[in-house]
Amino acid sequence: MKLKKKKRKPSGIWRYVLNETAKYLAKYDKLRFFSGVTYDQDGDGVRDSDDVIKKSDPSHLFFVPMWCENSTLIDHTSCKDIIFIPYILPLKGKNLNCLEPSEYLYDNTARMRDIELLTGIEFFTDRNIWSDVEAIQLRTLLRIR
């Protein structure tokens, strides 16, 4: 059985995210972008069990634009002075948001540790680049304006 997806242009928050990503790319030249879905049906901030995941749709989408502050790469993919802004946006239910897109995105800013707990992915693991203390600081950093 083949599922057909409707082709739609992004709208609302998704159009805003794409536009902001394009601005980051133009400004910083080299941009890494991690994204994926998470399963947190009970809203406890921890990845659901495999059994729950098999029976459900994703609850959230995460994305993280990353760039080097001074554009100096250590090993073609990583830099010591990394800048990143992690977001986790809900996918389920009707969006009753009345905020401006920039405010809504800011309200859904997360820590890298939140994404780690929801996905099982670990970030900042290369100890040749980041010490244990630096990695913990990066994982638990919550960006403010």
Image: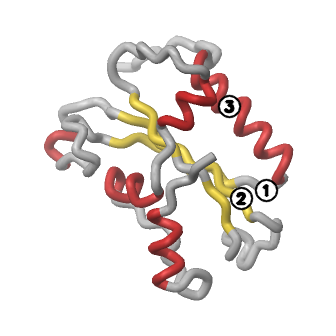
Q: Which residue is mark 3?
A: 18
Judge from the rendering whether residue 110 lies leftward or rightward of residue 145; answer left or right. left
Q: Quadrant of residue 12 in the image? A: top right
Name of the residue lying farthest toward the left: 51
Q: Is residue 111 visible?
A: yes
Relative to residue 134, is residue 70 drawn left or right?
right
Residue that appears at 41% across and 40% down: 37
Residue 131, image x and y in percent?
53, 85
Dot 2 lies on which element? strand
Specify the amino acid type for callout 3: Leu
* Crowd around label 1: few <14 · some 14–19 · many ≥20 (10 Å): some
Image quadrant assignment for residue 88? top left
Q: Is residue 61 left or right of residue 83?
A: left
Q: Amino acid at mark 1?
A: Lys
Indicate the secondary structure of the residue bearing disc 3: helix
Circles 3 and 2 in contact, beta carbons < 8 Å: no
Q: Which residue is mark 2?
A: 67
Could you tell me which residue is drawn at 23 percent across and 35 percent down? 41
Mark 2 residue crowding within 10 angstroms, few (<14) / some (14–19) / many (20+): many
- 57 versus 93 height, above or below: below
Asked if the residue under mark 2 is in contact with the one under mark 1, i.e. CB atoms within 8 Å, the reply is yes
In space, the residues marked 3 and 1 are separated at their CA atoms by 16 Å
Q: CA distance from mark 1 to mark 2?
A: 6 Å
